[in-house]
Amino acid sequence: MAQDKGQKERIMRTLKISAEEAQAILDYDKEVDRTSGGLEYDLSKEEQKQAIKLAHKGQERAKKNTPTVYKFDKRERKANVPKQEIISKLNDFLTELGMENISITNKERQVTFSSNGENYELTLVQKRKPKA
């Protein structure tokens, strides 16, 4: 009895409830300890099966060996017209300078050429706009 009184006071203090509500909680706990089911807040057999099924739903999905579908299609890049124009003008300029073996290896990026027996490569890099 003294132990029940201490538990009752602790429940009242912790949950900030009245003495009657704390006693109801203690009585319900004792009833749970004495019986093996059929209490007021217990689920019916069907509800319990449904609750278990829902609790394991994520695990069932993980167990299924569904293959992951990958897309191997290449993404179509938009042409960067300003870079193409710059590379074309560089090609023309190198021709005017009398460079040898001029070739555009990448129409938006690289030009290779030779001068006095040495090989050179120009790579055009477009920087991103700075974040505001």
Image: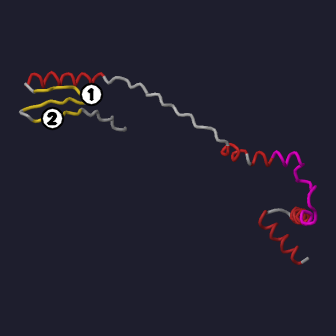
Which mark is first along the chain, 2 or 1? 1
Check disc 2: other Cα within 10 Å, few if <14, some if 14-19, many if 20+. few
Identify the residue shown where x is 36% and y is 38%.
131
Identify the residue shown where x is 8% and y is 32%.
115
* Tag of residue 120: 2
Classify the position of the N terminus by image quarter: bottom right
Q: Furthest-bottom residue in view?
A: 2
Element type where label 1 sits in the image: strand
Residue 56, x across and y down, in percent: 74, 48
Residue 21, x across and y down, in percent: 88, 61
> Which range is magenta?
30-50
In the rendered image, the vertical position of residue 100 relative to residue 32, given as above or below:
above
Q: Is residue 46 magenta?
A: yes
Frontmost residue, 83 versus 72:
72
* Tag of residue 106: 1
Please give the count of numbered marks on the rendered protein: 2
In the rendered image, the vertical position of residue 113 relative to residue 12, given as above or below:
above
In the image, 26: left or right of 68? right
Q: Using the numbered discs, state the Cα–Cα distance from disc 1 to disc 2 in whole angstroms.
A: 14 Å
Residue 17, x across and y down, in percent: 82, 62
